[in-house]
Image: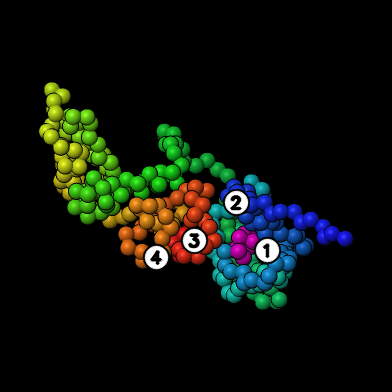
């Protein structure tokens, strides 16, 4: 008798995996009512693991929320985390209704496991009321943050290794792009730091050539650098921060292939989630540079 066929596992995409994680978090916060002001989170059937502060705080706040008017929203909280629990054990949450005012409700929650206190939390809930209004509509993001960061990284390389290296004299991270038109009639350098954007154009009124081999890197970039040295605000030196959803992998810039840490000339390359080339995601390659993927 032949063995029953096993269904092949389908490799879920990033969005499906994210939905699965969100569903698991929602399930953890869906506590069971166990009497007036009492709730419980049954132990999980997975391998026992420690439960730390964020997990218990979220469940305690969920328990407190179940005891206030649905129109009131959590305004502030303060918690003391005493010890970690375990995922395979039931956690109980006892909610004390300390006060219910006309605008604010206050709750205290004690989380217990095996008769030992894990956490004590106090939370305030605010009734809805009119707040500040913007005089003008808040600006709308034009492109996704992860796409913007990848573009910023490309333009940082113009300054660090390309035609805009003159800008390194500014002494702070900058990103930009040089430009040169046909017959050397126009030169540009458009670049920025975390705090200031500046664009420089070099050309003639009569549209004649600036000069042989005149490029954005040789004419506009030096002007940009001198202006920024004098005009840049005296702010802390800050690099461009990668947003969530951006992953880094070490690679050789000439060939674009995976590289081990310490490989001469290699560098960290950012990728949007779901766009990392297959050779970087291969198990064998990952073992060589897994510490470079965030």
Looking at this view, name the residue that lies furthest to the front.
1
Lower sequence index among marks 4 and 3: 4
Residue wearing tag 2: 18
Spatial separation of the CA atoms under disc 1 and disc 4: 51 Å
Residue 113 drawn at (x, y percent)? 69, 73
Q: Nearer the viewer, residue 35 or 16?
A: 16
Q: Which residues are magenta?
A: 55-64
Residue bearing mark 3: 285
Q: Residue at image x 52%, y 56%? A: 281
Label 3 vs 1, first from the N-terminus? 1
Q: Secondary structure at mark 1?
A: strand
| Tag 4–tag 2 contact (CB < 8 Å) | no
Which mark lies nearer to you, 4 or 3?
A: 3
Horizontal arrangement in the rendering, residue 69 relative to residue 230 (left or right): right
Is residue 235 located in the magenta-colored stretch of the structure?
no
Decide which of 160, 105 is in the foreground and name it. 160
Above-or-below relation of 71 to 137: below
The residue depicted at 44 percent of the width and 43 percent of the height is: 147
Q: Quadrant of residue 28?
A: bottom right
Q: Is residue 7 left or right of residue 183?
A: right
Mark 2 to mark 3: distance in Å? 24 Å
Magenta span: chief secondary structure: helix
Residue 101 picture location, percent across and down: 61, 53
Q: To which residue does mark 1 refer?
A: 95
The answer to which of 172 and 98 lies nearer the viewer is 172
Quadrant placement of the N terminus: bottom right
Q: How is the image coloured?
A: rainbow
């Amino acid at each position: 008798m032949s063995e029953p066929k096993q269904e092949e596992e389908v490799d879920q995409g990033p969005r499906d995996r994210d939905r699965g994680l969100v569903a698991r978090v929602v399930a953890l916060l869906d506590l069971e009512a166990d009497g007036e002001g009492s709730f419980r989170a049954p132990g999980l059937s997975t391998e026992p693991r420690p439960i730390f502060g964020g997990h218990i705080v979220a469940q305690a706040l969920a328990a407190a929320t179940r005891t206030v008017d649905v129109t009131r929203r959590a305004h502030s909280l303060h918690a003391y985390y005493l010890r970690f629990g375990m995922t395979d054990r039931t956690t109980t949450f006892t909610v004390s209704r300390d006060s219910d005012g006309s605008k604010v409700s206050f709750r205290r929650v004690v989380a217990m496991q095996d008769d030992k206190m894990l956490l004590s939390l106090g939370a305030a809930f605010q009734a809805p009321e009119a707040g500040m209004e913007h005089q003008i509509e808040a600006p709308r993001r034009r492109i996704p943050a992860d796409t913007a960061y990848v573009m910023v990284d490309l333009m940082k390389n113009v300054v660090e290794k390309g035609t805009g290296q003159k800008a390194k004299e500014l002494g702070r991270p900058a990103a930009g792009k040089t430009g040169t038109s046909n017959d050397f009639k126009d030169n540009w350098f458009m670049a920025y730091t975390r705090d200031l954007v500046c664009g420089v154009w070099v050309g003639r009124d009569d549209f004649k050539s600036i000069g042989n081999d005149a490029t954005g890197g040789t004419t506009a970039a030096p002007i940009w650098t001198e202006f920024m040295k004098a005009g840049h605000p005296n702010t802390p030196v800050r690099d461009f921060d990668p947003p969530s959803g951006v992953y880094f992998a070490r690679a050789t810039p000439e060939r674009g292939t995976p590289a081990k840490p310490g490989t001469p000339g290699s560098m960290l390359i950012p990728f949007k989630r779901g766009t990392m080339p297959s050779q970087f995601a291969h198990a064998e390659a990952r073992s060589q540079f897994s510490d470079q993927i965030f």
